[in-house]
Amino acid sequence: MDRSESIIERTAVVIPAYNAARHLAAVIDDVSVHIARERIIVVDDGSADDSHAVAKGAGALALQHEVNQGKGAALRTGIVHAGKIGCGFAITLDADGQHNPADIPKFIGRWVETGADIIVGNRMSEVADMPWIRLATNRTTSWVVSRLAGASIPDSQNGYRMISTDIFARIELETTRYDTESEILIKAGRLGAKIASVGVETIYGDEESSINPFVDSARFFRMVVRSFFW
């Protein structure tokens, strides 16, 4: 068994899901090409649709928040559970089909190359299809997060990541929503974690984003201010 195969057997995939029933079964099927279904952890974050039932029906390990707590809270539930079932790593990806599960081997290969504690997907080398407001926001927030984390992170808002469950267990999170993804990077960087990136594809479909540009931008900058006191 080579190192890639060994790491795959110690890796879970965590999928936070909120009203994601439309795409969820297909995402789980595509992920299962690379990761066994019993290590595909879907966290239904208080959905109003049948996301939880779809995840169970597709053979995933289905967890559930009774009420919506936010993407960050769903990530925390899933990554903590990955550690509990003996996985040393968790790959996080979205439930709406925007992250291509075919890129999972890229994360494994990048870990073999670098041994990094966190590997963040990077979409910034191919931005022709990225909405301009998202591109501008990503560049700004990535610049800020990189400096606070002490590492070069070209696409800090990309939720497609691989993270060591040991490092995650050392991070005390204060946030519960989209700002959690930035908080993880900043706190991990300050713990001395090695952070790397790998190029990934993003598929822009017809799904309406649940990100509120005003509310979530305010949360991000509030988190940045608080970070000076961590």
Image (cartoon, helix red, strand yellow):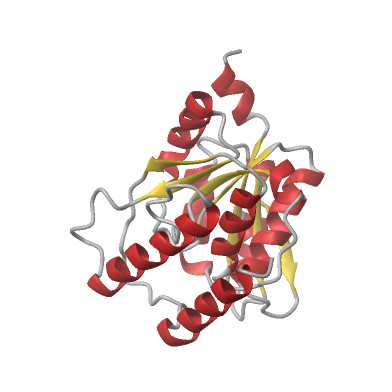
| Residue closest to the far top | 1
The answer to whether residue 148 is above or below residue 137 is above
- Give me the residue at 50% from left, 77% from top: 221
Front one among 149 and 135: 149
Task: Give the residue drawn at x 44%, y 61%.
Answer: 157
Question: Is residue 63 positioned above or below 41 on the image?
Answer: below
Could you say which is closer to the camera, residue 59 or residue 179?
Answer: 179
- Residue at the limit of the structure toward the front, as seen here: 228
State how many labels appear.
Answer: 0
Residue lying at the far bottom in this picture: please name it.
214
Q: Nearer the viewer, residue 81 or 193?
A: 193
* Residue 39 visible in rendering: yes
Considering every residue shown, the one lying at the far right of the view is 84
Residue 46: x and y, percent? 67, 76
Q: Pick the quarter of the image with the N terminus.
A: top right
Q: How far across and how far down the image is residue 19, in percent? A: 55, 74
Q: Position of residue 151 (x, y in %)?
A: 48, 47
Asked where in the image residue 211 lies, by quadrant, the reply is bottom left
Q: Residue 85 appears in which quarter of the rendering? A: top right
The residue shown at (47%, 39%) is 104
The answer, for residue 44, to whether it is visible in the render is no
Instruction: Return the x and y of residue 7 as percentages of the image width and height.
Output: 62, 27
In this view, 132 is above or below 199: below
At x 32% / y 57%, what residue is drawn? 203
Which quadrant is home to the C terminus?
A: bottom right
